[in-house]
Amino acid sequence: MVQLNDHQEAIEEANTSVEQSLMKTSDDPHRLVYHASPQVFWMNDPNGLIYFRGEYHLFYQHNPYAPQWGNIHWGHMKSKDLVHWEHLPIALAPSESYDLKGCYSGCAIKHEERIYLIYTSKQTISSDDQVASLQQQCIAVSEDGVHFNKLPQNPIIPSPPDVIGQNDHFRDPKVWKYQDTWYMVIGTKKNERGKIIVYQSQDLIHWDFSNVLTESDGTMGHMYECPDLFHLNGVDVLILSPEGAVEAGGAMLSGYYIGEFDYGTGHYEHGNFNKLDYGFNFYAPQTMEDAHGRRILFGWMPMDGIALNKSWAGCMTIPRELRWIGNQLKIQPVEEMKLLRRNHLAIDKYEVTDDKLHKIEGIKGDCVELIVMYDLRGTSAREFGLCVRISEEGDEKTVIKYNKETKELQIDRTDSGRGDKGVKSCHIEMNNEHILTLHLFLDRSTLELFINQGNYVMSGFIFPSPYSQDIIFFSMDGTALIQSIDFWMLDSFSATAGVM
């Protein structure tokens, strides 16, 4: 009989919980078809995105015991094409004295034909009748890309420099190699101001503090999470998720800086903060570079599984390719999303008048892709757009509309069904262009909208009735001229099928 160590036993217990729960789950009309999502229970931050031996690996924060945050493990899935996912055994479980309170966010790297996971451990420490949290950086390694062993040298970074950060807010390492040196960015805070700091190492075990990359000025929040620094077509992009930013008004916020990183000094000179997503549900994004040299991003779409009476909670966005073109970050669906397309319907030159709602035969559904190109020069309407996931009575709907005068694009989910409501807006700079392109993905309970070839993105959950599947076009105070419409049904089999 094989003797299991504490980590293996913790993983077996977690996997058993998932397997037993899967036997009890029933069909859910809101269950996602092609998004990477947990088989059951809670999912949050994407971790350890990596291309390894011809396959994409996606690790993620996972509670294998309930559809709510807590008992944080690392879930694991893989794919050959970024759209069809196979679930694998849980990769990391709390099992050691230093991570008994959770194996938190981190990254994956390939080194000597192995996968290394670098993650934040959490434990609680007691002194003078007080209990405090301690966050440290740890490492685990796998020969086969599936089964991971924690290294005896853990924790590899026990705390930040005291004058720089706090050891109770010190998390989310992202590691990469430049020339012969490993670099790591980590989020921390000091005096209620978020920071991103950078370390360097020659062996992945011994790390030296280098510098502070960026720090909140007070308006940008009290803690910086989930940093990711990478080079993209001549610029260095720093992604982060600031907690408590004034701009967000208490809501989740993720964005990026464009700048230049000096490997010699660890100094990062950057410009203004920019949002990555203007929608409702998007946080903690992470990127990877694949074998084709593409920079691919996944973000977490959070939801309240308990309030919605779901056996699952959360998903990843569809994979998005990042490009730096013409001094602008372009965010677009990866090419592989086209693998899901079926039953193409194409329409040219369509006028949407303001005297009726326009319903086009064949354009409806809850799992679809839709590209609509509006000709603004031929559009007299003050406001126009489309409604999706509409009930037959018209009382349930999600509204996407553009105001030609204010240049505001808005998603309104006031009548979207169950779940959170609200309106989100995005100001669209047209840059003397006359075509407004809306590229929409629906997946039962998610909506992702890419605007003008990825200049802007808006994402969110909606929970309408499964029978609300109509799509209509409308305009107000004039006519909207559509240059073209392209519509596809997307494969209805589960893209996250697979066994543990």
Image (spheres, rainbow, N blue to C red):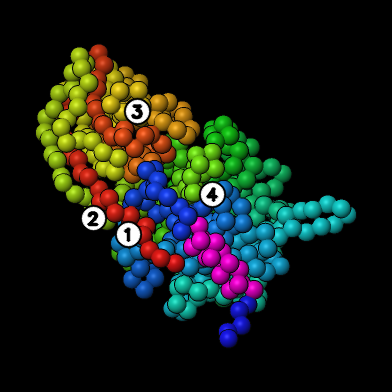
Instruction: State whether residue 66 is above or below residue 432.
Output: below
- Quarter of the C terminus within the rendering: bottom left
Q: Which residue is mark 1?
A: 84
First to last magenta residue range = 6-21
Q: Earlier in the sequence, mark 4 or mark 3?
A: 4
Whole-percent x and y of residue 76? 46, 63
Q: Position of residue 58 (x, y in %)?
A: 43, 61
Give me the C-alpha separation between circle 4 and circle 3: 27 Å
Mark 2 and mark 4: span between their CA atoms? 30 Å
Q: Residue most toward the right? A: 128
Q: CA distance from mark 3 to mark 1?
A: 29 Å
Name the chief secondary structure element in magenta.
helix
Q: Horizontally, is 65 left or right of 491 in the view? A: right
Label 4 element class: loop
Residue at the spot 42% in from the left edge and 50% down from the top edge = 26
Residue under pointer 4: 67
Q: Residue 316 or 137: which is nearer the viewer?
A: 316
Please, what is the three-letter code of the amino acid marked with disc 3?
Answer: Lys
**Badge 2 or badge 3: first in the primary sequence:** 2
Tag in front: 1 or 4: 4
The residue at which mark 2 appears reads as 339
Q: Secondary structure at mark 2?
A: helix
Q: Residue at x 24, y 27 (%)?
A: 472
Q: Helix, strand, or loop for circle 1?
A: loop
Say whether marks 2 and 3 touch (CB < 8 Å): no
Q: Relative to residue 491, is residue 11 drawn left or right?
A: right
Quadrant of the rendered structure where residue 204 is? bottom right
Where is residue 273 shown, x and y percent of the image?
49, 40
Number of the label disc, if any, that sits on residue 397: 3
Q: Residues within 10 Å of mark 3 (few under 14, many from 20)?
A: many
Q: Is residue 400 above or below residue 475?
A: below
